[in-house]
Amino acid sequence: MMMDLEGSTEKSADFTNTDETSLLVIIMDSNPAQRILRENPHVLTQCVDSVIAFANAHLMQKAQNKLAVMACHSKLSEFIYPGPGKQLDVRQIDGQYEVFTLVEKTIKQNLAKILTSETSTVITESLLAGAIAMALCYIHRINRIKAPGLKLNSRILVVTGSGDSASQYMNYMNVFFTAQKQNVVIDVCALDQHLSLLQQGCDITSGMYLRVPQMQGLLQYLLWVFLPEPPIRQKLVLPPPVKVDYRAACFCHRELIDIGYVCSVCLSIFCKFSPICTTCHTVFKIPSLGVKPKKKKLKI
């Protein structure tokens, strides 16, 4: 029985050249101002353990898979894996894979540094829009230095318990449409409140949005909904998509509105009419009250 060895080697070479790599960037909201953390601080430990197990499951799917984890706080957003400093020297412990041990220790150590460095008691909102922008920059850099012929599928997972922040509306829209242009999928796992702005980002980038019903099953929901790649999700039975709330936030009060006024120059949105746009300072005419002028009688 004769075998075409040259043909088989060519096929294997083509397979390695067209092999796909999945890059997952996880943004974990660690802001202590979240209501779910104020009521029960132990939820953060459960969330970190679930995210670490989910990240290791992503690396377990394929040896070529890449991972990055960010911590989003009230004043900064920083990568906690891979860490900003020197990589830890981790040895095998109780038969555990060294990479899994490295992921766990690096994330916990860098996150502890961020939490201990934040000594301010001022409660501010989480900088989620800035964290997504940093994740997009990281993905763009990885795309530039990747091997020729390698296809990189990139996606971002946001795990947060914060509420909607209308003050970051323009920043959200900028990162959502940038991700859509770069073919980056944004997934959102809401731990506490419904997030209409982030739900818009999921719909724009063809991602998944899920509000976790029970925190005890966080890891199960992460593995069920967010672990499969976006092309595979179409063949799975996942939670049905909910109706997307596409209301915009006004620039004057930072509140979501149904009907408002839009500046024709900079497209800023206002809930009440203003003769001067506070964004671009364009002057508009005051709308008339709708009273028709009287017709003058013609003298014959």
Image (spheres, helix red, strand yellow):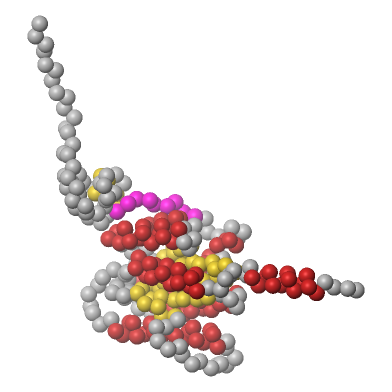
Please identify the residue farthest to the right as the structure is shown.
Answer: 1
**Horizontal and vertical percent position of residue 258:** 31, 46
Q: Nearer the viewer, residue 172 or 54?
A: 172
Place residue 181 in its image quadrant: bottom left
Please state, as top left, top right, bottom left or bottom right, where the N terminus lies in the image. bottom right
Q: Nearer the viewer, residue 109 or 177?
A: 177
Q: Is residue 196 left or right of residue 88?
A: left
Q: Nearer the viewer, residue 35 or 293?
A: 293
Q: Count the marks: how many?
A: 0
| Residue at the (38%, 61%) spot, across then down | 175
**Horizontal and vertical percent position of residue 23:** 51, 71
Please state, as top left, top right, bottom left or bottom right, where the C terminus lies in the image. top left
Place residue 4 in its image quadrant: bottom right
| Residue at the (63%, 68%) spot, across then down | 18
Predominant SS of the magenta segment: loop
* Residue 117 highlighted magenta (yes or no): no
Q: Is residue 14 left or right of residue 51?
A: right
Q: Is residue 212 left or right of residue 41?
A: right
Place residue 86 in its image quadrant: bottom left
* Residue 248 highlighted magenta (yes or no): yes
| Residue at the (17%, 39%) spot, across then down | 285
Please identify the residue farthest to the top as the structure is shown.
Answer: 300
Does residue 76 sit above or below 189 in this rendering?
below
**Horizontal and vertical percent position of residue 55:** 51, 76
**Horizontal and vertical percent position of residue 91:** 53, 93
Q: Is residue 209 visible?
A: no
Magenta span covers which residues?
241-249
Q: Is residue 188 visible?
A: yes
| Residue at the (50%, 86%) spot, across then down | 102
Does residue 79 sit above or below 291 in this rendering?
below
